[in-house]
Image: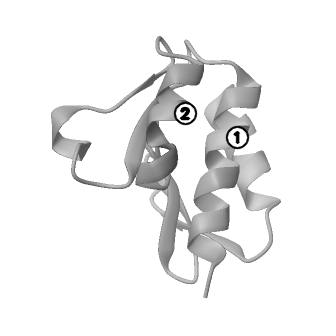
Amino acid sequence: MTPDDVARYVEALPQVKRKGTEARPAWYVRDRLVARLDEPDTLVVRVPLSKRESVVASCPEGFGVPPRMEAHHKVEAYLDRVEDAAVRTAIDLAWEMQSRP
C-alpha cells in the first residue's frame, strides 16, 4: 500500500479530516488520531490495546510496536512489508475506536 493509497482509503471514511503536513499527513475523527504517516513507508495507526496483539500477529513482518509506543494505543504499519487488507483492517479498528462518542 502506498501513502497515496492510505490517504484515499482513510479519507473515504465518514467524518475523517486530514491534518498534519504534506510530508507527515495525519487523519483524525473529532480531533482524535486515526493514523499518521511518520515516514514514507511507516504508518502509525491508533488501535485498541485489546486488538493490538491480533493486528501484529496477523502480519508480524508488517506491523510492530516499538518501545516508545508500548504504553499507547498505537501500532506501526510498515507499508512496504504489509498486505493492503491488513492495513485497511487496522485503519478500520482505529476509525471505529475514534468514532465512538
Q: Quadrant of the N terminus?
A: top right
Q: Residue furthest bottom?
A: 101
Please give the residue where the numbered disc 2 appears in the rendered image.
55
Residue at 61 percent of width and 42 percent of height: 90
Colour scheme of the rendered structure: one colour
In the image, taking residue 86 as reference, residue 67 lies left or right, namely: left
> Which SS class for mark 2?
helix
Q: Amino acid at mark 2?
A: Val
Q: Is residue 30 above or below residue 41?
A: below
Q: Residue at x 65, y 62 (%)?
A: 95
In this rendering, position of residue 28 left or right of residue 53: right
Answer whether residue 40 is visible to the viewer in this image.
no
Closer to the camera, 101 or 8? 101
Given contact means CB atoms under 8 Å apart, are the residues at marks 2 and 1 in contact? yes
**Upstream in sequence: badge 2 or badge 1:** 2
Please tell me how crowded label 1 is: few (under 14), some (14-19), or many (20+) other residues with Cα within 10 Å: few
Image location of residue 35, percent across then percent down = 52, 53
Between 59 and 11, the residue placed more toward the observer is 59
> What residue is at 64 percent from the left and 48 percent from the top?
91
Choose top left, top right, bottom left or bottom right for residue 68.
Answer: top left
- Secondary structure beneath label 1: helix
Q: Which mark is residue 89?
A: 1
Q: Amino acid at mark 1?
A: Thr
Q: Which mark is residue 1?
A: none
Q: Residue at x 39, y 48 (%)?
A: 74
Q: Locate the C terminus by quadrant.
A: bottom right
